[in-house]
Amino acid sequence: MGTKSLQQGPIEPRIFRVEDNMLNMTNDIRDIKKCMEQTQGEFKLSVEKMRGEFKLSMEQMRGESKLSMEQMRREFTQSAVKSNGTLNTIKWQIGVLLTMIVGGGTLLGFLLRDRLKTQQPSPQSSYQEERMEQIEKPTSKPRAETNMERKDTGAGQTGKR
C-alpha cells in the first residue's frame, strides 16, 4: 500500500495568487477604513451642526419667553386694573340682590301672617279639633281590665282571685 501524493504543480504561482489576494484584501481594508473615517467625520460634522442649531433655537426660545413673560405681565396688570372696577360693580350688585331677597322675604312673611290671622277656620279643621278634644278627654265608662293589669294569683290557684 502506497500513498499517493497529489501533484498540484509548482508552489510559486500559488504563493503569488495568495499574495495578490492578501494585497487586494489590504487595499479593501484601507478603502473601508477611509470610508469609516469619512463617515465618522461627516457624523461629527452633523452632530456639531445639530448642537449649534440646538443652541441657537434655545437662545431664540429664551428671548421669546422673556418677551412673552413681559407681555403677560403687562396684560395681567392692565386686566387687574380693569377687573378691580368690575369687581366693585359685582359686589354692589350682589349686595342689592341680597337686600331685595331679605326685604321680599320679610314682606312675604308679614303678608302670610296677616292672611292667616284673618282666615276663618274651615269645616274640616273644626272637625279635626273636635276629634282631638274627644281623644284627649278621658271617658267616663269603666274599661275592662287587661291581662297585663291583672295581678298574678299564683301558679297553683286556678280561677280564684
Image: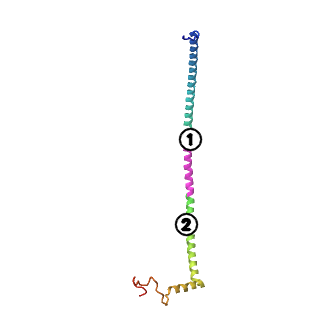
The quadrant in which the C terminus is found is bottom left
Q: Residue furthest bottom?
A: 140
In this picture, is 69 found above or below 89? above
Q: Residue 121, image x and y in percent? A: 58, 84
Residue type, mark 1 in image: Met
Judge by depth and name the residue closer to the eye, 126 or 136. 136
Res. 98 mark: none
Residue bearing mark 2: 95
Q: Which residues are magenta?
A: 60-83
Q: Earlier in the sequence, mark 2 or mark 1?
A: 1
Residue bearing mark 1: 61
Q: Is residue 123 magenta?
A: no
CA distance for labels 2 and 1: 48 Å
Task: Give the SS element for disc 2.
Answer: helix
- Few, some or many C-alpha atoms within 10 Å of disc 1 (few <14, some 14-19, many ≥20)? few
Q: Is residue 122 visible?
A: no
Circles 2, 1 touching at the beta carbon (< 8 Å): no
Q: Residue 132, image x and y in percent? A: 53, 84
In this picture, is 52 found above or below 36? below
Q: Is residue 105 visible?
A: yes
- For the point 57% across and 23% down, the residue is 32
Residue type, mark 2 in image: Gly
Residue 36 shown left or right of residue 154 in the figure? right
Q: Residue 110, image x and y in percent? A: 56, 77
Q: Would you identify the image quadrant in which residue 82 lies? A: bottom right
Q: Residue 50, image x and y in percent? A: 56, 34
In the rendered view, how is the structure colored? Answer: rainbow
Task: Give the SS element for disc 1.
Answer: helix
